[in-house]
Image: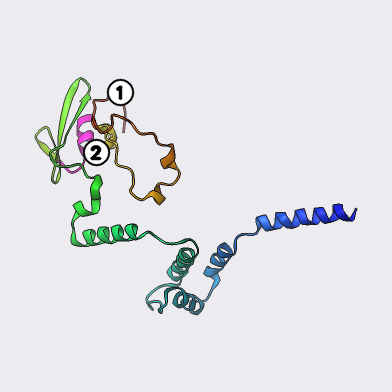
Amino acid sequence: MAKALGARISCRHGAQEAETPPPLETEIGRLPALSLLELRTRWKTLFGHSAPKSLRRNFLARAVAYQMQVEAYGGLSVATKRRLREIADAVRNGDANAALGSNRIKPGTQMIRQWQNTTHKVTALNEGFEWDGRTYKSLSAVANAITGTNWNGYGFFGIKRAPSSNKNAAGPRRSKLHAVPDAEAAPVSPLKTNVGNRRA
């Protein structure tokens, strides 16, 4: 009987351990209850310098929580940090092309789409897209002009976007994707759909 009682106690103890959150999660959960002085002390310990005096308590708690996770699990890769800096610099300088990165359609590329028995040809420009003698800012705007309804321009023209270069952001979904053998040979193909009556 003593063995059975001991087994029940250890099972209960094991169940308690499974329900107890990890120490880091518990510690992060307590951050919002800390005083401003305690948060500033944590900041200095984690970042190695004092927190700017202008930061509010809520932001300090979030920044401290993030840095605790970085120390426990690792932070952004060097390549990701570099790319974020490039995007920030591009936005600061007003250079949209640099912020867009390599997923941009090269100027001169022509996309052909059959829609309601009419063939539509769109040409990528340095700044936007040309269709029917007019310039549009996006492929979605062109698709809207052609159909009269809201469309994702890439989807309307059958263009598959390049996969994310950040392998960590893509997660396990990447392994489920299967390569399309002729995707590079014919990036744009006329689509035959029955969505002519689609409403926005």
As shown in the figure, which amino acid type bears the numbered disc 1? Thr
Q: Percent from the top left, x then y, of residue 56? A: 42, 72
Residue receiving disc 2? 140
Q: Is residue 176 left or right of residue 123?
A: right
Residue 144 painted magenta: yes
Under circle 2, the secondary element is helix
Which residue of the protein is positioned furthest toward the top in this rendering? 117
Q: Quarter of the image holding residue 23?
A: bottom right
Q: Considering only vertical position in the picture, is 31 above or below 82?
A: below
Q: How many numbered discs?
A: 2
Which residue of the protein is positioned furthest toward the front in this rendering? 181
What is the basis of the colouring in this image? rainbow
Residue receiving disc 1? 193
Residue at image location 34% in from the left, 60% down from the top: 78
Residue at image location 24% in from the left, 25% down from the top: 190
From where the camera sits, is residue 151 visible?
A: no
Q: Percent from the top left, x then y, of residue 76? A: 39, 60
Graded by Cα atoms within 10 Å as few (under 14), some (14 to 19) or many (20 or more), the crowding at tag 1 reads few
Q: Percent from the top left, x then y, of residue 172? A: 45, 44
Residue stretch rendered in magenta on the structure:
136-147
Graded by Cα atoms within 10 Å as few (under 14), some (14 to 19) or many (20 or more), the crowding at tag 2 reads many
From where the camera sits, is residue 81 visible?
A: yes
Measured Cα–Cα span from mark 2 to mark 1: 18 Å
